[in-house]
Amino acid sequence: MLHEYDQELHLFIILSRAHQWVTAHVHQDIRKSGLNPTEFGVLELLYHKGEQPLQQIGEKILMTSGNITYVIDKLAGKGLAQRKACPTDRRVIYAEITEQGRQFLDEIFPRHREVIANAVSGLSPEEREQAIHLLKKLGIAAQSSFT
């Protein structure tokens, strides 16, 4: 049996490796669609949550506002997203998915879900439920103890 500190280190390594391999599957699929993971993340956010102020996009996907501007520019250049001024506050700019962007994700998202399902298929449905519960518990505890 592992010493408590060795167990904690072992958990961290195993968690990191699992994340690395699941993410590798996801990123490989995203690249097939012609987007990078950040572009896909922003487009997916707009697809599922609707228009978003540029500042909030950065907070939701952990990016700086300068990077968000660049990503929105790239998505706009591909016809997948656009900027929209706030009608009540000229300082606020929204990003929204275009109809072309919506059609694009409608087309590729089923395959993307399948790739994710395949990447996590090493666990049974019951084990996935347990993992969701345990990892959420771990994340909340780590977040609350962060200084």
Image: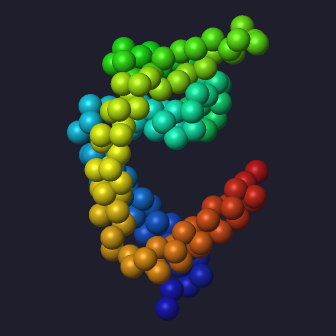
Is residue 3 or residue 85 the one in the foreground?
85
Residue at the extreme bottom: 1
**How many numbered marks does the figure carry?**
0
Q: Quadrant of residue 53?
A: top right
> Would you say residue 71 is visible in this rendering?
no
Q: How far from the left and from the top, in percent, is residue 59?
A: 64, 35
62 over 6 or under it: above or below? above
**In the drawing, does residue 15 fall left or right of residue 100?**
right
50 over 14 or under it: above or below? above
Q: Residue at x 36, y 66 (%)?
A: 120
Q: How far from the left and from the top, in percent, is residue 74?
A: 39, 18
112 over 83 or under it: above or below? below
Q: Residue at x 55, y 22 (%)?
A: 95
Is residue 54 or residue 95 the one in the foreground?
95
Q: Residue at x 69, y 61 (%)?
A: 140
> Would you say residue 110 is visible in this rendering?
yes
Q: How far from the left and from the top, in percent, is residue 24?
A: 31, 52
Q: Quadrant of residue 19?
A: bottom left
Q: Residue at x 57, y 38 (%)?
A: 49
Residue at the extreme left: 32
Is residue 12 or residue 46 the one in the foreground?
46
Colouring scheme applied when the structure was drawn: rainbow
Residue at the extreme top: 90
Q: How far from the left and from the top, in percent, is residue 15?
A: 46, 66
